[in-house]
Image (spheres, rainbow, N blue to C red):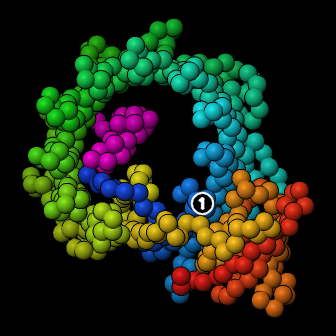
């Protein structure tokens, strides 16, 4: 029965639920910034390195892959540019033939702090193509519609439109999703949201459209503990057109301890007569209430058997440095690594990653985010400094036309014309040492700064 559920509903009901609940059992007392994440995924090793500006905004994500000798080499990079604390540009790059090529760009405009438009551009070689434009429309503080265009902002190029409506409590009450199937936009899905007296989401009903009328399709019903307010159950149902009633599909049961920590999730499917359990997750905590283990069980020979365990250890600032997913006896070779979807905190936000093992290294934000040795007129602000070879010049501070790198003897060793609006200065191919960078801006200013490459800092 579970496999009959359309993909959009399985994503909505099952993938989002662990994200919402994860916040209950890993708590970050104060924000720390991840400097490096090392990921083991089966036989592959990846390293993600992060760089931040003085406002702790993430500017660069650098992805590297280990070769057969366990030496890492960069393969992908993402750059974010901010104005007034809002991300106005996200650029994705891939390394090809020893140079970085832009592959994708998202440019965002705002009215105040409200997102107004996104332009998605794809790059193939030297050809750039507008792939999608997304328009966001508001009334006051409320988002009332999202319109997606194919490649230009005309009525004929609208591919999808989402309309939002709200109740008297300013809660989302309905969504109407229109998609282009032929020449015209047609209603593909209608979603209604209902709330209980405590303003918690009581139910979600999915309708399709046919012959100018709503056709019931899917229903999700939530139940909460009347004393704690914790969600204790979520049931999904499918409309049975033959018998004209809702038929049970799946059920998810949540259990909490006296400290309101989530300790168990039970997944059931309905076989037409009875609820049958198929998966269980158990959560254990240390004395400080921090998550230690997430254990998956499945019913084998009429008993719950451990399949794999995700362990959170080596905690720093109440967050785990090491997360490992390992088989138990009934899953595979005991204590061998298993690739699974691991939830973890990334800079105060919940993230998911397919991995066997995740190791997170943090930085001290006061000293490691941004440093520059001289801030007088004519001296450039560049960070981090020292660095492992990747530096950043914030485009909100300077519009850089070009830069040159000199060694301590004054010899020019590298130069670059800033073809794209980027703040990345990639010197990862240079050895450790002290250098001078000379930058020319779009208004012909020349700025310099001493920079240090130190891969052991």
Q: Is residue 16 magenta?
A: yes
Q: Residues within 10 Å of mark 1 (few under 14, many from 20)?
A: many
Q: Is residue 141 magenta?
A: no
Spot occupied by residue 389 in the image (x, y as percentages of width and height)? 65, 77
Q: Residue 71 versus residue 381: which sits nearer the camera?
A: 381
Residue bearing the label numbered 1: 53
Residue found farthest to the right:
444
Q: Is residue 301 left or right of residue 446?
A: left
Residue positioned 54% across, 78% down in the render: 66
Q: Residue 442 versus residue 379: which sits nearer the camera?
A: 379
Spot occupied by residue 342 in the image (x, y as percentages of width and height)? 36, 59
Spot occupied by residue 301 in the image (x, y as percentages of width and height)? 10, 56
Quadrant for residue 238, please give it.
top left
Residue extent of the magenta highlight: 1-24
Can residue 303 be spotted in the picture?
A: yes
Q: Residue 88 versus residue 129: which sits nearer the camera?
A: 88
Residue positioned 28% across, 13% down in the render: 244
Q: Is residue 84 left or right of residue 423?
A: left
Q: Is residue 90 left or right of residue 422?
A: left
In what element is the residue under mark 1? loop
């Amino acid at each position: 029965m579970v496999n009959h559920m359309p993909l959009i509903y399985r994503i909505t009901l099952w993938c989002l639920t662990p994200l919402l609940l994860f916040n209950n059992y890993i708590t970050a007392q104060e924000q720390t910034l991840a400097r490096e994440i090392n990921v083991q995924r089966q036989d592959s090793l990846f390293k993600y390195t992060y760089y931040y500006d003085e406002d702790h905004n993430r500017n660069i994500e650098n992805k590297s892959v280990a070769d057969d000798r366990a030496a890492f080499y960069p393969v992908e990079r993402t750059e974010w540019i901010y104005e007034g604390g809002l991300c106005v540009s996200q650029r994705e790059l891939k390394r090809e033939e020893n140079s970085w090529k832009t592959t994708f760009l998202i440019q965002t405009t705002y009215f105040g702090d409200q997102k107004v438009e996104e332009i998605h551009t794809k790059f193939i070689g030297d050809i750039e193509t507008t792939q999608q434009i997304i328009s966001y429309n508001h009334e006051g503080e409320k988002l009332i519609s999202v319109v997606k265009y194919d490649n230009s902002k005309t009525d004929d190029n609208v591919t999808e439109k989402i309309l939002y409506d709200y109740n008297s409590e300013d809660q989302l009450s309905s969504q109407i999703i229109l998609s282009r199937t032929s020449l015209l936009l047609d209603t593909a899905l209608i979603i209604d949201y209902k709330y209980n007296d405590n303003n918690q989401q009581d139910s979600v009903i999915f309708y399709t459209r046919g012959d100018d009328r709503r056709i019931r399709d899917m229903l999700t019903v939530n139940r909460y503990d009347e004393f704690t307010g914790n969600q204790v159950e979520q049931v999904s149902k499918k409309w049975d057109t033959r018998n004209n009633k809702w038929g049970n599909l799946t059920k998810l049961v949540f259990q909490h301890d006296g400290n309101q920590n989530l300790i168990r999730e039970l997944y059931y499917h309905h076989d037409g007569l009875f609820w049958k359990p198929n998966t269980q997750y158990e959560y254990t905590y240390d004395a400080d209430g921090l998550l230690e283990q997430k254990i998956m069980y499945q019913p084998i020979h009429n008993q719950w058997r451990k399949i794999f365990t995700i362990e959170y250890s080596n905690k720093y600032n109440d967050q785990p440095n090491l997360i490992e997913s390992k088989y138990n006896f009934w899953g595979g070779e005991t204590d061998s690594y298993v690739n699974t979807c691991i939830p973890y905190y990334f800079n105060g936000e919940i993230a998911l990653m397919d991995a066997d093992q995740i190791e997170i290294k943090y930085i001290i934000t006061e000293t490691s985010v941004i440093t520059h040795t001289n801030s007088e007129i004519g001296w450039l602000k560049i960070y981090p400094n020292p660095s492992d070879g990747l530096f950043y010049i914030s485009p909100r501070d300077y519009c850089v036309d070009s830069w040159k790198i000199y060694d301590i003897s004054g010899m020019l060793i590298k130069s670059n014309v800033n073809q794209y609006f980027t703040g990345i200065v990639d010197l990862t191919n240079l050895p450790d040492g002290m250098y001078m960078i000379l930058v020319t801006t779009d208004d012909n200013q020349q700025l310099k700064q001493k920079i240090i490459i130190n891969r052991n800092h």
